[in-house]
Amino acid sequence: MRLTKQDLIDDLRRLGVGPGMTLMVHSSLSALGEVEGGANTLIEALLEAIGPTGTLAMPAMSGARPFNIETSPSGVGSVTEAFRHYPGVTRSLHPTHSACAIGAKAGWLLEGHIEQDTAIGAGSPWGKLADLNEGYVLLLGVDQDRNTLLHYPEEIVRAPYLSTIERTYLDEEGVEQTKVMHWFPGPHRDFIGLDRLFRERGAMRVGKVGKAVCRLLHAQSAVEIEVEALRRDPAAVLCDNPNCDDCVRQRAKIKAHELEQYDFRASALLDELSDSLTDAEAGLDAVRNEGIRCVELGPALASELLAHPDGIGAQFTDQLEEREMAVSCLHCGLSPEQFIAGGEVAGRQMRMAIETAQAIEAPLVKVPSPPVGTEAEAALTRLREALELAEGSTVTIVFENTPGSCWDGGEACEAPLLALTDDYRLGFCFNPAHFANLGEKPFLGTYRKYKLKRYARALHVTDGCRPGRPTYTLPGQGHGEVKELISIFSCRSFDGFLTLKMGDQRGPEAFKQQAEAFRRLLEPVA
């Protein structure tokens, strides 16, 4: 049975569409069933339902570049394209989110759209719609994923995953212009998940127009409800599908934004995620997906980088740039035995590491901890040589407390730092698990007793236990007092690196668990 204009009007009124409304319509003509007269009949039914004091609006977004207000077709359905050509309808000038309208408030709704810094902000047709008590969104046979208004709350809360883009359009004189838009919405959203909230809060009515399930949503109430949801959970409109790359990346931006409130920078040991720099992309993505923007290159990956600076190294640098990531610390590529032996080969390797770190803007170069039994003076000599090579650079030479080396416990690590206390280019990487492995209390004992904090350039988020228990655990599940250390370092406005190192685990899934445990420890600090 073909739907007449009166059939449509009757159904619209049963749904709640009435005189004086300002109505933004998103539609699927085919979902209604067969309509006598097609899109124009639907438009006429909508106009009659809202009456002469109402305003009818529809999106008229086009993918055309440059956007031409006169000729660029609407790409969001046949009804919107028919509406664009309907007598008396005007269109807003905007390269990405043009809208069309007719009626009492059409001029006010569309004016000044191109002048806004954003696409769907307060000065856009959607933002203005939400200012009206009689402003509504009508979804005719489409769901909330087609509801452009729902991007507006993301802009209100300044969602961290929004971006800045540029698009071109032809101005009134036909001259091509470039428009920069901030807080621009990204790809995939789970707006469908808001449907229940809108129903429960009484902001939406659901009914049928023809065969189509339709939603009439009070714009102002919808915006308020979504803003509340986003302030409770910044990822409220993102899906939790682990294979949805769009939402995984957007969640990563939220996590990165949360980390930006701290003075420290978060980092991760890439060697635990990638076996080779030639296959480092999955590891880098795993780090980035947790909102972490820095990686440390340990002995294996650093050696690979230093051996092939122009080949593998250039490729790796490109991968970092693509992800807006950086290297926090570069291992010098020497084994403990090579480091303590010194000589020309070791000196050349160290010089190359410092120069490479300088080139890739890595602030730290790590030297290995000499084998146990190494004389203290010999170890100091090698540190002095490394510091001399770093003179004139921006690089800090660091070492880590390592069980089974001559720099293991708190006292052993403090000694070279105090001996070379006048050299600001020497720093320390504080590993709580390794102190715990020796039976020390990393916070209540080592941190308080020795002066290591003065020289700390990195705190490793690595937990572990005293002898007889697991060597490594998730952060917060061992004897490393990691939570206390993160808290006290934050109190000191620590501006070095908090580096996630797993110890005896490898791979993206293990790292994800490590990162989740790290964020739980951060919550009381925020």
Image (cartoon, rainbow, N blue to C red):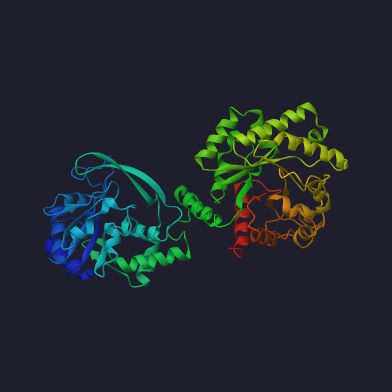
Q: Is residue 102 above or below residue 243?
A: below
Give the quadrant of residue 514: bottom right
Q: Position of residue 318 (x, y in %)?
A: 53, 35
Residue that protrudes farthest toward the front in the picture: 422
Q: Position of residue 218 (x, y in %)?
A: 29, 68
Give the quadrant of residue 63: top left
- Residue lying at 59% horizontally and 52% vertically, measured from the top left: 512
In this rendering, would 200 be left or right of 94?
Answer: right
Is residue 416 at all visible to an observer of this figure?
yes
Q: Is residue 324 above or below residue 410?
A: above
Q: Is residue 169 above or below residue 158?
A: above
Q: Nearer the viewer, residue 119 or 242?
A: 119
Q: Position of residue 18 (x, y in %)?
A: 18, 69
Task: Specify the quadrant that holds the N terminus.
Answer: bottom left
- Residue lying at 40% horizontally and 61% vertically, measured from the top left: 193
Q: Nearer the viewer, residue 32 or 120?
A: 120
Is residue 332 at all visible to an observer of this figure?
no
Badge count: 0
Task: Specify the quadrant that holds the C terminus.
Answer: bottom right
In this rendering, would 509 be left or right of 176?
Answer: right
- Residue lying at 31% horizontally and 53% vertically, measured from the top left: 116
Q: Position of residue 423 (x, y in %)?
A: 74, 43
- Residue lying at 70% horizontally and 38% vertically, measured from the top left: 299
Q: Nearer the viewer, residue 142 or 22?
A: 22
